[in-house]
Amino acid sequence: GVAVLEAILVSRSGGRRTESWLEREYLRISDAAGLPRPLCQARIASRGAFLARVDFFYPGASVIIEVSGAVAHASASQRAADAKRRNRLQAEGLLVLDFTYEQVVGSPEVVVAQVRSVLQGRHAA
């Protein structure tokens, strides 16, 4: 069913399935900077139970990258849901970095530098 279709689509995309232009832009700047390739649209589980699906996941460093466009994350209820989700992920020992559209598009070098620094620091630990 759905799992088989999803596996086929992920395979055809080279494991780089994204859901938005902003996610594709993060991958573009990440690739251009030579950062390691993250898992895209990764499902995170805790003690066998689904916890969240995240934009990008670096499993070796336990780092999650989320990119947030203004429209989908503008309401008070959406910001509250985002914070609750981020807190659940961080309570599991995962580091969540959240970048806005303005950061990814306007200051990609800052985004790349922060991700690189965090990945290097978490791999060294």
Image (cartoon, grey):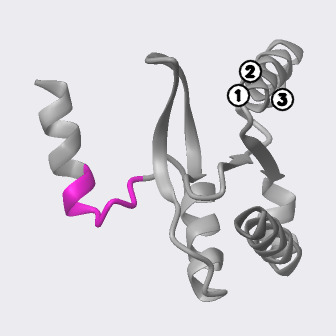
Residue contact at pointers 1 and 2, CB within 8 angstroms: yes
Residue 89 percent across, percent down from the top left: 71, 29
Magenta span covers which residues? 10-17
The disc labelled 3 sits on which kind of residue? Ala
- Residue tagged 3: 74
Residue 13 percent across, percent down from the top left: 28, 62
Q: Quadrant of residue 79?
A: top right
Question: Which secondary structure lies at badge 2?
Answer: helix
Q: Spatial distance from mark 1 to mark 3, Cα to Cα?
A: 26 Å
Residue 111 percent across, percent down from the top left: 82, 69
The disc labelled 2 sits on which kind of residue? Arg
Left or right, 32 with respect to 10, comes to right
Q: Nearer the viewer, residue 14 or 125?
A: 125
Residue 27 percent across, percent down from the top left: 56, 69
Identify the residue shown where x is 10% and y is 24%.
1
- Residue tagged 1: 92
The disc labelled 1 sits on which kind of residue? Glu
Going from the N terminus, do you reach mark 3 or mark 2 first? 3
> Label 3: few (<14), some or many (≥20) within 10 Å?
few
Q: Quadrant of the C terminus?
A: bottom right
Give the overall secondary structure of the magenta segment: loop
Q: Nearer the viewer, residue 9 or 57?
A: 57
Question: Which secondary structure lies at badge 1?
Answer: loop
